[in-house]
Image (tube, grey):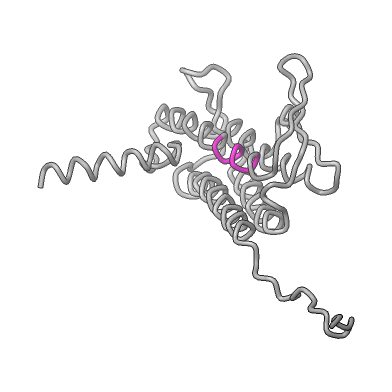
């Protein structure tokens, strides 16, 4: 007997959430946490280690032309450029844009404000963007090249790039007699390795 249209079973609309989507969301929030952590290290530097504005503009003896203020500004700008490119499609990103001689290069209060503002923007924007949201990266190598990337990849890069510049900030701080926390300027992978190595040494000694 032919089944009537009223008896036809329809697919359930109560579909279980996609596990992979949940994983991507978790990864996105993990990346946000990393970005906030490395930027907060710079806030701590400004609040608790540097004591005068002119310490931001002391030029390194080992890296001519390099100052703490310039490194803070340059690293922070990568996050700002990424967030700015995500305001509306098409999403086009260029890290070659430079905004030099900003207050954060020479003023502790200016540096603190700029760092806290970019942390606030990350908290507002990142949860609204997909980890794998595609974007186009423009780079001068010196030839103009175009690459396809994603928001998640570039957020990760901005954090790692930040750590790279913090390592140079650490050197300059040492030149002017400022000792920073042991984890300042070290990549997460390095800290993980050091932790595992320390645990291994302790196990062998016990």
- In screen coordinates, is 112 left or right of 48? right
The one of 95 and 129 positioned closer to us in this rendering? 129
Residue 127 x, y percent position in the rendering: 67, 58
The outermost residue toward the left is 206
Q: Is residue 86 above or below residue 102?
A: below
132 vs 46, nearest the viewer: 132
Give the residue at x 65% y 39%: 154
**Quadrant showing the N terminus:** bottom right
Q: Is residue 82 magenta?
A: no
Query: Which quadrant of the structure image shows residue 91?
Result: top right
Q: Residue at x 38, y 41 (%)?
A: 191
Nearest the viewer among 87 and 26 is 26
**Residue 203 in the image: above or below residue 144:** below
* Residue 199, position as x, y percentages in the image: 23, 45
Number of marks present in the image shown: 0
Q: Which residues are magenta?
A: 154-160
Q: Is residue 40 above or below residue 168?
A: below
Q: Residue drawn at (79%, 19%), measured in percent from left and top?
A: 144
Does residue 137 appear left or right of residue 16 in this picture?
right
Q: Residue furthest right?
A: 5
Residue 30 position within the rendered picture, expressed as x and y whole percent measured from the top left: 54, 53
Residue 29 lies left or right of residue 133; in this view the side is left
Which residue is painted at 65% across and 70% down in the image? 16
Determine whether, in the image, residue 18 is placed left or right of residue 138.
Answer: left
> Does the magenta-highlighted stretch encompass residue 155?
yes
Extreme residue toward the top, this view:
142
Depicted 33 relative to depicted 154: above or below: below
Q: Main secondary structure of the magenta part?
A: helix
């Amino acid at each position: 007997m032919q089944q009537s249209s009223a008896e036809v079973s329809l697919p359930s609309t109560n579909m279980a959430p996609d596990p992979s989507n949940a994983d991507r969301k978790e990864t996105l929030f993990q990346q946000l946490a990393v970005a906030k952590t490395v930027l907060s290290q710079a806030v701590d530097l400004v609040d608790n280690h540097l004591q005068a504005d002119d310490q931001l503009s002391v030029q390194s003896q080992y890296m001519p032309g390099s100052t703490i203020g310039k490194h803070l500004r340059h690293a922070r700008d990568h996050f700002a450029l990424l967030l700015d490119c995500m305001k509306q499609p098409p999403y086009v990103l260029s890290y070659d844009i430079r905004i030099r001689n900003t207050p954060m290069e020479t003023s502790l209060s200016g540096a603190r404000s700029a760092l806290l503002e970019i942390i606030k923007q990350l908290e507002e924007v990142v949860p609204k963007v997909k980890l794998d949201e595609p974007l186009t990266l423009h780079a001068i190598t010196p030839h103009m090249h175009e690459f396809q990337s994603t928001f998640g990849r570039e957020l990760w890069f901005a954090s790692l790039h930040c750590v790279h510049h913090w390592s140079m900030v650490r050197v300059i701080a040492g030149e002017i007699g400022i000792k920073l926390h042991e984890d300042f300027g070290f990549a997460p992978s390095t800290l993980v390795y050091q932790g595992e190595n320390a645990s291994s040494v302790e196990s062998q000694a016990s």
